[in-house]
């Protein structure tokens, strides 16, 4: 194998395959893979560390055998039959510890470890008591993976003591069954259970490692691509664990720095998608809280919420949660585009006075090269497919009537540009009929965004432009940017405001203020906006003259009346020379 290919294989072994073997419980295989990759990637370091370990093992050969004999005798005196095995740690684990702690070989004090293998679970804790009453314990080095096993079903008691000759000794106390599972993985779990059904049934019922392996396979099956699967799996392979509980006492193992959102998705994907809040140890807590060992977590859900916020993806650490959030977000966006597309198609059919039915469109799917109605509607909503193409697929003799954008002004009103009457909040594209599409803002059930440089607010006359891949872009009718779409009338949509008085929403607007340069002027401007319940998104200041500063403010308001009131109050301030709305 070429050198480059061998190094790449060794890197993948360290990054993926060895940790994966460890997560599946095959500790012996993981250590062997680590050492093989270490020897290939860093031959000089491997040779130096291995040489030092061999020399140290030769010097301490009598010490190791002495500890084995002493510990075996002390346990036998208390009636515990045990096998004590001393071993030196592998080259790669020693090198990693030196790198991680930035210490030299001589400063490492736990190079040798001992395994105490007993017959029963009770013997594990009795042996632990004997060890702790015989030698001083090193604080902070005790871990009980018997009462709270790792996700790979690893169970053992870890402790470190100051043994004979003041030598620091690391001990792992476990039963024979625990030892076999730790060395050979979850498959060994079935060797000690006779008459309990097939090994697969036994593992699925008793092994948390088997459950983790099944979740990993599900993640591979549900992921959109192999790279996403690899990203999510690696996220979980390199995290320590925390153990949390549901209110009913079910144990949930999660990576360190996991949040209640991770916890919710670990319980069930539907629970995660519907999560709106949480309680940690009985107290209301933010969903961004970092969970700790022993926390009791209660998830608060809302049935009305079926899709989580896309921003949650950056808050979670488990691959399952990230994959579920991405999947739910993609589904929600697709549903929004499909809803928009359906409204556009139905509106075209109504305008053309043709009958529309899902059954007829289903029969026309091959002509559109689509496999489902939702796919067709989503393509129309994203402007990848024209509504007129859908009509022609259903009715081959359909002919589109293109409406002239710059129509002649009706006698009863002013026209599009230079409108004098702004009492109506509906805008009708000339020569079109049918109801306008209602717009409720960026948080509605349609993929809607507002034009930059000012946007539109309720009270403005508006028009919608269908933007490929983005849905509807809303422009105020006086926007100069609309001239760019004069040659594409098929993209113009008839839209109207549809706000509910009891649940008002905020909309983006931009104002330009010329303020006097004196201390506190900006504070007075901000105070006016705050007192009138406006929300500032962004401020840009430009010094135009020694005595004046141009301030451009992006803010959120409820409607045109609200915006007009804020501008009027700003003009009344002595520090404000001029205030006006900016229209794109």
Image: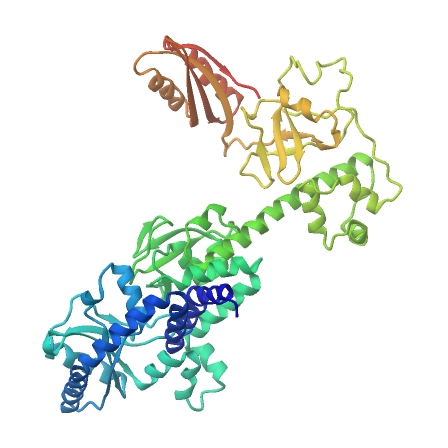
Instruction: Describe the colour scheme in one phrase.
Output: rainbow
Q: Quadrant of residue 29?
A: bottom left
Q: Is residue 41 above or below residue 75?
A: above
Residue appearing at x 22%, y 77% in the figure: 55
Left or right, 196 with reference to 465: left
The residue lying toward the viewer, choosing from 286 and 170, is: 170
The residue depicted at 43 percent of the width and 22 percent of the height is 540
Residue farthest to the right, as pictured: 397
The image shows residue 296 at horizontal and vertical percentages of: 32, 60
Which quadrant is the C terminus positioned in? top right
Residue at 51% x, 57% y is 323
- One can see residue 107 in this view: yes
Location of residue 536 in the rendering, given as x and y in whole percent from the top left corner: 42, 27
Number of numbered discs overlaid on the protein picture? 0
Q: Residue 57: where, in percent of width, then height?
A: 22, 79
Residue 434, image quadrant: top right
203 sits to left or right of 387: left
| Residue 171 visible in this rendered orientation of the protein | no
Q: Nearer the viewer, residue 40 or 223?
A: 40
x then y, percent, for residue 455 = 55, 26
Q: Residue at x 86, y 36 (%)?
A: 399
Residue 477 vs 338, above or below: the answer is: above
When asked about the image quadrant of residue 513, the answer is: top left
């Amino acid at each position: 194998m070429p050198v480059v290919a061998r190094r790449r294989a060794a890197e993948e072994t360290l990054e993926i395959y060895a940790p994966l073997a460890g997560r599946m419980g095959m500790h012996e295989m993981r250590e062997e893979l680590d050492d093989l990759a270490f020897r290939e990637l860093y031959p000089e370091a491997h040779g130096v560390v291995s040489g030092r370990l061999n020399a140290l093992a030769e010097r301490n050969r009598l010490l190791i055998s002495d500890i084995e004999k002493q510990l075996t005798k002390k346990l036998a005196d208390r009636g515990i039959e045990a096998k004590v095995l001393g071993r030196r740690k592998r080259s790669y684990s020693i090198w990693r510890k030196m790198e991680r702690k930035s210490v030299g070989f001589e400063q490492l004090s736990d190079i040798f470890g001992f395994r105490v293998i007993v017959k029963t679970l009770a013997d594990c804790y009795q042996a632990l008591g004997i060890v702790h009453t015989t030698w001083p314990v090193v604080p902070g080095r005790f871990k009980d993976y018997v009462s709270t096993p790792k996700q790979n079903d690893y169970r053992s008691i870890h402790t470190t003591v100051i043994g004979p000759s003041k030598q620091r000794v690391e001990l792992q106390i476990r039963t024979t069954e625990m030892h076999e599972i730790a060395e050979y993985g979850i498959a060994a779990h079935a060797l000690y259970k006779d008459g309990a059904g097939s090994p697969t049934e036994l593992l699925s019922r008793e092994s948390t490692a088997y459950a983790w392996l099944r979740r990993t396979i599900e993640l591979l099956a549900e992921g959109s691509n192999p790279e996403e699967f690899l990203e999510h799996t690696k996220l979980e392979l390199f995290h320590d664990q925390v153990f949390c509980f549901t209110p009913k006492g079910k144990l949930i193992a999660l990576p360190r720095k996991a949040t209640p959102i991770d916890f919710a998705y670990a319980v069930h994907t539907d629970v995660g998608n519907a999560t709106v809040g949480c309680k940690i140890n009985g107290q209301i807590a933010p969903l961004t809280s970092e969970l700790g060992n022993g926390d009791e977590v209660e998830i608060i859900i809302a049935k009305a919420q079926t899709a989580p916020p896309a921003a949650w993806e950056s808050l979670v650490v488990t691959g399952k949660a990230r994959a579920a959030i991405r999947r739910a977000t993609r589904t929600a966006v697709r549903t929004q585009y499909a809803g928009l597309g359906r409204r556009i198609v139905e509106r075209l059919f109504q305008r053309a006075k043709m009958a529309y039915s899902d059954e007829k469109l289903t029969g026309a799917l091959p002509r559109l090269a689509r496999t489902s109605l939702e796919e067709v509607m989503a393509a129309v909503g994203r402007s990848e497919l024209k509504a007129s193409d859908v009509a022609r697929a259903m009715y081959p003799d359909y002919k589109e009537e293109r409406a002239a954008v710059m129509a002649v002004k009706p006698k009863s009103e002013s026209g599009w540009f230079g409108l004098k009457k702004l009492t109506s909040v509906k805008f009708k594209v000339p020569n079109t009929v049918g109801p306008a599409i209602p717009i409720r803002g960026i948080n509605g059930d349609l993929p809607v965004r507002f034009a930059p440089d000012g946007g539109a607010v309720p009270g403005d006359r508006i028009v919608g432009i269908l933007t490929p891949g983005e849905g509807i872009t809303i422009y105020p009718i006086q926007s100069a940017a609309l001239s760019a779409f004069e040659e594409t009338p098929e993209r113009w949509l008839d839209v109207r405001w549809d706000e509910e008085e009891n649940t008002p929403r905020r909309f983006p607007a931009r104002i330009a203020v010329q303020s006097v340069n004196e201390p506190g002027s900006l504070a007075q401007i901000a105070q006016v906006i705050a007192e009138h319940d406006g929300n500032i998104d962004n401020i840009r200041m430009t010094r135009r003259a020694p005595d004046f500063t141009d301030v451009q403010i992006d803010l959120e308001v409820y409607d045109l009346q609200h915006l007009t009131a804020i501008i009027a109050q700003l003009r009344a301030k002595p520090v404000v020379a001029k205030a006006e709305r900016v229209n794109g």
